[in-house]
Amino acid sequence: MHCIQSQYVRVLVLLLVHVGVAPAQPAAIDQAQVERVEDLSEALANQLHELSLSLRDRDMAAAATHFDADLTASPWPAFVDGSVTKTKGIERRDMPLSGRFVNRQVYLNSWKTFLDSLASIEDIRIKVKSADFVQSAKPRADAVIAMAIVGRNTTGQRAWVEVKAHLGADLVNDRWHIDHLELSQVVVRVVDVDLFSEVALPAGVYQAAPPFGTPGNSSFIAHGVATADVNGDGWLDAFVTGHGANFLYLNQGQGSFLDQADVAGVQITPSATAPLFVDVDNDGDSDLFLASTGSQMLFENRLIPDGTLQFRDVSLDAGVDRFAQGFSAVSADINGDGRPDIYVASYNKYGVVMPDSWSHATNGTPNLLFINQGDGRFQEQARVWGVADSRWSYAAHFGDFNGDDRQDLYVANDFGENALYLNQGDRCIDAAGAMGMADPGNGMGVSLGDFDNDGRLDIHVTNMSSTAGKRILARLFPEEASVLDATRVLGKLAAGNSLFRNLGNGTYQEVTTTVGPFTAGWAWGGGFVDFDNDGWQDLHSPNGFVSGKSLKDT
């Protein structure tokens, strides 16, 4: 963590210079001081991770070691107290806070009683939102923290507890001794029913990968899934790319799946990242395209005309065996000839090759556009169409963004601004900047959906949000209003996902802060789904990265 956060500070300072934000006198930003303070913040955050693990395990004796003998703290309220509001099956309870302070033992007893109101605890996380430090014989922290507790109450309902608090602590012998903890908000949300249940194992689709960095999993290249009715029985099947082998799960129609990748000829292929089902020959069955960090692949589904589900590798004959760091693929008829074309979002070998800029990189491997020739062959024409983006692309999405009945293309880039390629009929122009949709925020995904039910497709862009990044920026620029324009790029790198409302006249309005915000952590992919079948599109945003042995390693 220390190395990661120190690097984050250095990156931020370098970006300040890059975007012209750095002050005339470099000494105005004391990088060493910022790093020292952030190291203290991370030391506090790491110890709070230890505390969260103790609480998750209900080990109050271990939790007590983090608190000073002279602790003064506001006690936890009773789990059932508070005013109740209910929205769409979610009960929100705002807990009353007493305003008084108690000693360590009384405080810990109240916390134990609160946790005992949960029949099970799935996870507890504590984050340092902001922190100031007083330097004396022993550093003192004055911090604002946020806590999330996820579990089930005594009646089995899923419960989510959100807590905000003010914390004071002294650093003694490399350990923080918390001597003041004042709760400022405690909110409990309880759902009436579970919308989803984990059924991968009984459904026959459960697969476990070795931990990252161990034999069998030396790379953190993402792997993906695509769905289609590949055998024509009316049920959606799923194809999954994996470590060393792929899986083709045929839907049995009874809530279970059967892996037939070996029988269908697609179990063993060169390593692939993202599958895409698309009927490339317009014969009525779904063919399989595989994006890859290597040569791209295409497998023709022989269900039609042979009558048997079998995928045949036609990559060489089709001309799609082009090299790229392919991280995803999408399809649409970009030239309006009635045949599906394929676009591959290409990244680069991160770690071997580093971005030439953290916010305006151009040294990714160029994206590919395969134009369907209608005779089983494709021509790669990304440069011809002006869409050979090389800004470390992660994902893309076709759609008619300006209402001219042509398929345009939005590309989410990790280390560069995003692209919105408007289709001119035989080429595309990038209008993202002009339309205010460049969204420079470590783009990891893009999806379309009508979130406000006005009949127009809106755009959701998946980025990253960083508590540490926001904390560092607030420390560098305590007067936000005076540097709002100057830090817009930096703020975006830590802000989270974005949502653009389609105004219906070929323009979009960013409504992230008014509708959201969407701080989903280290987020990927995701998209619009009506989870509760109420007629309104909801948003799902998976997140996370490489997991270690403890929360500190994540």
Image: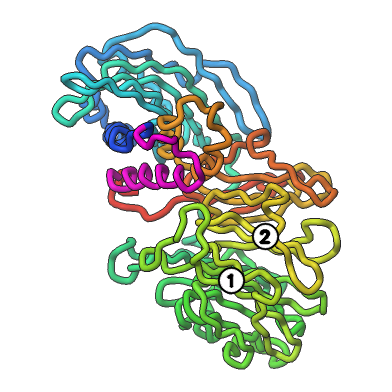
Rendered image quadrant of residue 170? top left
Q: Position of residue 420 (x, y in %)?
A: 69, 58
The answer to whether residue 13 is left or right of residue 38 is right
Q: How is the image coloured?
A: rainbow
Residue nearer the viewer, 154 or 432 = 432
The answer to whether residue 55 is left or right of residue 130 is left
Q: Which mark is residue 367?
A: 1
Residue nearer the viewer, 379 or 181 = 379
Image position of 446 with respect to 205: above or below? above
State which region is magenta.
1-27
Mark 2 crowdedness (10 Å alpha carbons): few <14, some 14-19, many ≥20: many
Residue at 45% across, 26% down: 478
The answer to whether residue 238 is left or right of residue 385 is left
| Residue on which the image places disc 2 | 410
Residue at the farthest top position: 100
Residue at 68% across, 70% down: 386
Q: Position of residue 531 (x, y in %)?
A: 66, 47
Q: Quadrant of the N terminus?
A: top left
* Element on which disc 2 rests: strand
Mark 1 crowdedness (10 Å alpha carbons): few <14, some 14-19, many ≥20: many
Image position of 350 with respect to 519: above or below? below
